[in-house]
C-alpha cells in the first residue's frame, strides 16, 4: 500500500475574496512504502501547503489525500505520521526527554513505556546525554535533532519534514542528513521532505519531485539511484549528474511574476 496518495489536489486560499491565492493546481503525488521523496521548488510554490494538506492541518479545495489507505483526517487522529518543521518548536519549560515524550503522552502511552521510547529515540539522534537539559541549553542543531526524535517517537510510518535542516551549518546539516537516513532505514519510515537545497534533496531521496511557481504544480519527478548514501556517494558521478538534472528541471520551471 502507498504511504501517501495525493490525487487531483487543488488548493485555493481565501476563495472568492480579493486576496484569493491559487497555491496548488492539480497535484498528483504518490509516495511508496518506505520511500524518501523530496519536494523542491521556488519560494511560494506551495511545498509547505502540500505538506500541510498531507498532515490534514488544512483541507484541499478539491481532490483527495490518503495516508496509508485512510483519509488524511483519520490518519492524523491515529497519529500515522510525525511532523518536523523548520523551527524545532520545542516547549521551553519541558526537558528534552519530556519534549520527546509529549506525543506519546497525548496518545495515552503508559509512563514507563513512553520514557523508554523517548530515551531510545534520543539515543538514535545522539542526544542520550542531554535528556535532562532544557531546550535553551542546546544548540540549534541539537534542538532540531530533538524535534526529529519527537517526530519519530510514535514510530510513525510516515515522516513529514519541512526544511528541518534549513538553519544549520553545512557540516551539521550533512551529519544530520546521514543520521536521518540511518533512522529511516532502521524504522522503515516513508518520508516527504521539503528543502531548498538541490544537493540535500539528491543525497537523501529515492525521488526528487520538482514543483513550478504559483500555482504550484509538479513538473518533474526524478528518480535518484546513488551507489551509496555516504561521502563516497556524495562524490560519485551519479550524484553530480542528478544535481544537474534537478537544476535543469528547476530552470525549466516557468516563473510567474508575483501579483
Ligand atoms: N494560510 C494561508 N492563507 C493564504 N495564503 C496562504 C496561506 N498559506 C500559504 N499561502 C500562500 O500559498 C502560496 C504557497 O505557500 P507555501 O507556504 O506553501 O510556499 P512554499 O513553497 O512552502 O514556500 P517557501 O519555500 O518560501 O517556504 C503562497 O503564495 C502563500 O502566500
Ligand atoms: Mg515553505
Image: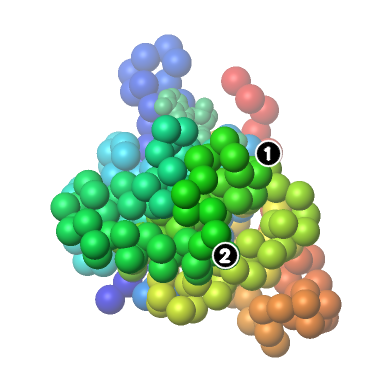
Numbered circle sitting on residue 126: 2
Quadrant of the drawing holding the C terminus: top right
Q: Is residue 253 shown to the viewer in this render?
A: no
- Looking at this view, is 216 or 182 the one in front? 182
- Residue at x 28%, y 76% (from the top left corner): 1
Q: Is mark 1 within 8 Å of ligand 1?
A: no
Helix, strand or loop status at disc 2: loop
The label nearer to you, 1 versus 2, is 2
- Looking at this view, is 144 or 48 the one in front? 144
- Residue at x 63%, y 38% (from the top left corner): 43
Q: Which residue is mark 1?
A: 255
- On the image, the x and y values in percent for residue 217 come to 51, 48
- Residue at x 73%, y 71% (from the top left corner): 242
**Left or right of 15, for residue 95:** right
- On the image, the x and y values in percent for residue 64 come to 26, 51
Task: Report how far apart the C-alphas of labels 1 and 2 lie in the structure.
Answer: 41 Å
**Left or right of 79, for residue 247:** right
- On the image, the x and y values in percent for residue 203 come to 67, 69
Position above or below: 195 against 202: above
- On the image, the x and y values in percent for residue 107 come to 20, 52
Q: Is residue 123 shown to the viewer in this render?
A: yes
Sequence-wise, the earlier of marks 1 and 2 is 2
- Near mark 1 (Cα within 10 A), the count class, few <14, some 14-19 or many ≥20, is few
Position above or below: 81 against 85: below
Q: Name the image quarter holding residue 254.
A: top right
Amino acid at each position: 500500500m502507498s504511504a501517501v496518495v495525493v490525487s487531483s489536489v487543488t488548493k485555493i486560499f481565501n476563495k472568492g475574496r480579493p486576496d484569493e491565492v491559487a497555491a496548488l493546481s492539480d497535484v498528483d503525488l504518490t509516495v511508496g512504502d518506505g520511500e524518501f521523496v523530496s519536494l523542491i521548488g521556488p519560494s511560494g510554490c506551495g511545498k509547505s501547503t502540500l505538506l500541510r494538506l498531507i498532515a490534514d492541518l488544512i483541507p484541499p479545495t478539491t481532490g483527495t489525500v490518503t495516508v496509508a489507505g485512510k483519509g488524511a483526517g483519520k490518519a492524523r487522529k491515529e497519529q500515522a505520521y510525525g511532523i518536523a518543521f523548520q523551527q524545532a518548536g520545542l516547549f521551553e519549560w519541558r526537558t528534552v526527554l519530556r519534549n520527546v515524550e509529549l506525543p506519546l503522552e497525548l496518545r495515552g502511552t503508559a509512563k514507563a513505556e513512553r520514557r523508554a521510547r523517548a530515551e531510545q529515540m534520543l539515543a538514535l539522534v545522539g542526544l542520550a546525554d542531554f535528556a535532562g537539559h532544557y531546550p535553551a541549553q542546546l544548540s540549534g542543531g541539537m534542538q532540531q535533532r530533538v524535534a526529529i526524535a519527537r517526530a519519530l517517537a510514535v514510530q510513525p510510518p510516515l515522516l513529514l519534514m519541512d526544511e528541518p535542516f534549513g538553519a544549520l551549518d553545512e557540516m551539521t546539516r550533512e551529519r544530520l542528513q546521514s543520521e536521518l537516513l540511518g533512522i529511516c532505514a532502521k524504522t522503515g519510515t516513508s518520508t516527504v521532505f521539503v528543502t531548498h537545497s538541490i544537493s540535500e534533496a539528491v543525497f537523501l531521496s529515492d525521488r526528487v519531485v520538482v514543483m513550478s511557481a504559483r500555482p504550484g504544480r509538479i513538473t518533474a519527478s526524478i528518480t535518484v539511484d546513488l551507489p551509496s548514501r555516504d561521502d563516497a556517494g556524495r562524490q560519485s558521478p551519479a550524484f553530480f549528474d542528478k544535481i544537474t538534472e534537478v537544476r535543469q528541471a528547476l530552470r525549466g520551471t516557468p516563473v510567474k511574476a508575483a501579483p
